[in-house]
Amino acid sequence: MSTVTRRSRFAFGQQGLVLMACGLALYFTQRQWRFDGAFRAQRFGAAVAVWPQNAAGWRMLSQQADQSSAESVQDAQRAVRDSPDDWQNWSALGAAQLASGNVGAARSAMAEMGARARIFDAHWELANLYLVTNDEMGYWQQLSRAFAVELPTAIYGSLSFVYPRALHDPSRLLRLADESCRAATSPGQCVVIRQQLLFLLIDKYNWPLAVREWEVLRAQPLTASQREDVGVEADYFLKRLIADHRGMLVHTVWSELLQNRLVPADQLPAAADRIVNGQFSAPLQPTAFGWNVCGTCGPVVAREPMASVGSGRDWALSMEMDGSAGESGVLAWQSLLLDPGTHYRLTFTAQRADESSETGLVIRVVNSEGHPCMAADLSAGTANKRYSAAFQTASNAQDASPDSYRLEIYYQRPSGQVMLRGVELLSGMFLTSINAPEAPKADGGIC
């Protein structure tokens, strides 16, 4: 045989192999394309007919509503047989076994799933199987594994689901967070879980555990951005405590914020019963102790430069009335913590824009029930007046902790007045406690 003949046959053989490879590639591509099309259309019976060896088709077929329990089990078993290392196939088999009433087989299949999976969802699913089969120990063990292997996408939602089941032993939630932190791959993951658990405990008004979790979170090594986040969480914590009249806890959290500088100093009072930013030297910020401004009341409340330079106060609160306010409402307010059975005096300066008309504005302090302790009516009068009013907080023999009050800038439309005219500048607000022997009769009585 000549060399040319041998080369021709070799080339022909190569061409045959190439054509065969192309044919196989075309076959597999077409099969994949037909399988994917049926899969996307949720025609899983057609999908497994096209590609019987693809376990995903059998798994999805087992989950169809029109399948009998026996068929679902058989299809899930086929998926497990074709791809035993895929935890999703064991999950489908467990669900099918549970639907058929075979709880023992379901638990066995789910246990196989748990042994293979390294993601949150798998262990969460197994935990809930233990829950519906009244295995509480298994439930909490799998929850611990779930949070240990991976942080869930919705941490707060997952913890909220768990919370009612921990009411008889709330410390389980804290242990869950502890175990998650031990398994975390970075310190940041631990901070995230602590933050979300703190929010949940605050929202559930579980103050003992919230305080404990707050202390744990505060002790974490924090980056600069995480310190800012903790400041936001602390402010949220304070607001909820104030709303629930937990004065002593407010004082505790507030003190720690000051000591650890977790929020800017101008957002917190130097003492719990003092006004924050009473001289308006910093922009108004809606913090727990800072000024909160009504954005839908009509009047525009803003921090403006003082017109009278040299007064020792460079800034003041300006209220520009646009005539669209309702009959009454609170324009701005901030929370105060006041000791029971104590005399206080509120002082401030008001500069009037128009002396000839009533303003309708009142500076007042109200208690937790909305009852005014004192009210300074900014009626027609001098253009630049220093106001002073005293009041006394009620005694409480059972509880000596501070209680929540509010300092308010309140508006009541004057009779017959259409267009609002009011105070141009408010400045120099101070609240001071007065020693009992020196205390005058309270202007607003006791509240």
Image (cartoon, grey):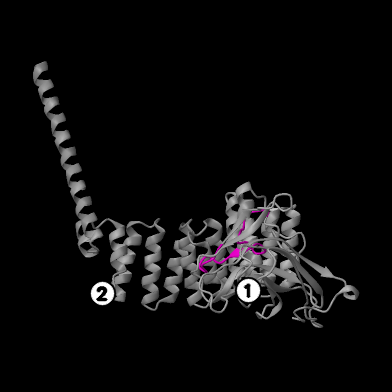
User: Mark 1 belongs to which amino acid?
Assistant: Tyr
Residue 330, image quadrant: bottom right
Percent across and percent down for residue 333 are 63, 68
> Could you say where residue 197 lies in the image, as x and y percent from the top left?
59, 64
Find disc 2 in the rendering and name its residue.
66
Please tell me which residue lies in front, 253 or 33: 253
> What is the crowding at mark 1: few (fewer than 14 residues within 10 Å), some, or many (at least 20)?
some
**In which quadrant of the rendered image does the N terminus lie?**
top left
Comparing 331 with 157, the one in front is 331
Whole-percent x and y of residue 331? 58, 68
Q: Amino acid at mark 2?
A: Asp
Seen as rendered, the residue at the extreme top is 3
Start-end of magenta stretch: 281-300
Q: Name which of mark 2 and mark 1 comes first in the sequence.
A: 2
**Mark identifier at residue 171:** none
What kind of element bears circle 2?
A: loop
Q: Is residue 438 visible?
A: yes
Q: Position of residue 149 (x, y in %)?
A: 53, 56
| Marks 2 and 1, how far apart at CA | 45 Å
Image disc number at residue 205: 1
Query: Crowding near pointer 2: few (<14 within 10 Å), some, many (20+)?
Result: few
